[in-house]
């Protein structure tokens, strides 16, 4: 059965959740796909959402921590529905395409609760930038400097995105103040990490520029 197109103007999401680690279910794996299922379960734990709502949550609130495309989101939703962890219904709209709204089932809530109660795995993550920088002694200082300058620009762009998200969502009334509290805590963690990264990168750039001069 095909999924109806969804409205380009759904209700604004009020709560978002950011996570970084996968859960324990063997069939989901411990990689990105395993983590994505729990991100989606967490988002639906806040309120029922369309696929469009979920993608917008990634673009507006989760992009600094995690990224997912439409195909990944809908593939994961399909898998969650097949496992009985989410259900959906088509909501007719007059003059606009119907909306398919997803929500947690009782089994999905249990899955989310079980994941939230698990210890967080050790944070060993893949970082292509640091991996490439590790080997930059095999290339020129000019090439290494270009990598560092691009990285610095990316970090500043992330801070700008986070500042926008805080202004757009941080002061909004919410039905779930505890959820928002922890989401803001995640934001503070990430901001501190980015600022430290900026300081390190600026020092490295200054050192290489001095050497080149």
Image (spheres, helix red, strand yellow):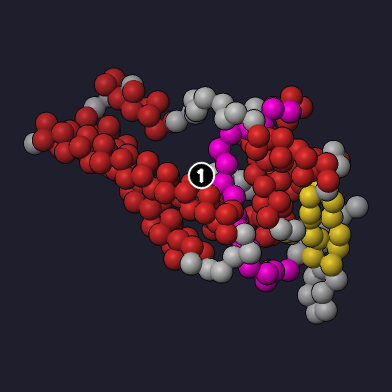
Q: Residue shown at 38%/53% (left/top)?
A: 159
Residue to which mark 1 is pinned: 65
* Pick the front one: 81 or 152: 81
Q: Residue shown at 57%/42% (left/top)?
A: 19
Vertical placement of residue 210 versus 10, above or below: above
Vertical placement of residue 99 versus 139, above or below: below
Q: Residue shown at 42%/44% (left/top)?
A: 189
The 10 Å Cα crowd at callout 1, few under 14, some 14 to 19, many 20 or more, is some
Q: Residue shown at 71%/46% (left/top)?
A: 41
Which x, y percent locates residue 145?
25, 36
On-image quarter of the C terminus: top left
Q: Which residues are magenta?
A: 7-25
* Pick the front one: 29 or 179: 179
Which x, y percent locates residue 183?
53, 51
Vertical placement of residue 199 versus 15, above or below: above
Please say whether residue 31 is visible from this viewpoint: no
Which x, y percent locates residue 143?
27, 33
Q: How many marks?
A: 1
The overriding secondary structure of the stretch rendered in magenta is loop
Vertical placement of residue 138 versus 170, above or below: above
- Residue 21 magenta-highlighted: yes
Label 1 secondary element: loop
């Amino acid at each position: 059965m095909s999924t109806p197109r969804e409205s380009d103007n759904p209700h604004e999401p009020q709560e978002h959740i950011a996570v970084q680690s996968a859960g324990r279910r063997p069939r989901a794996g411990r990689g990105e796909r395993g983590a994505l299922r729990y991100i989606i379960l967490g988002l639906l734990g806040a309120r029922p959402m369309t696929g469009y709502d979920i993608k917008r949550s990634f673009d507006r609130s989760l992009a600094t921590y995690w990224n997912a495309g439409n195909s990944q989101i809908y593939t994961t939703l399909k898998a969650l529905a097949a496992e009985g962890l989410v259900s959906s219904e088509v909501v007719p709209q007059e003059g606009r395409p119907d909306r398919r709204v997803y929500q947690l089932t009782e089994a999905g809530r249990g899955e989310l609760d079980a994941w939230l109660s698990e210890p967080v795995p050790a944070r060993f993550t893949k970082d292509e930038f640091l991996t490439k920088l590790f080997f930059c002694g095999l290339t020129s200082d000019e090439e290494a400097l270009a990598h560092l300058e691009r990285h610095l620009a990316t970090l500043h762009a992330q801070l700008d995105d986070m500042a926008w998200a805080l202004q757009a969502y941080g002061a909004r009334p919410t039905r779930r103040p505890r959820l928002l509290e922890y989401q803001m805590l995640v934001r503070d963690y990430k901001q501190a990490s980015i600022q430290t990264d900026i300081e390190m990168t600026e020092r490295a750039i200054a050192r290489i520029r001095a050497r080149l001069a």
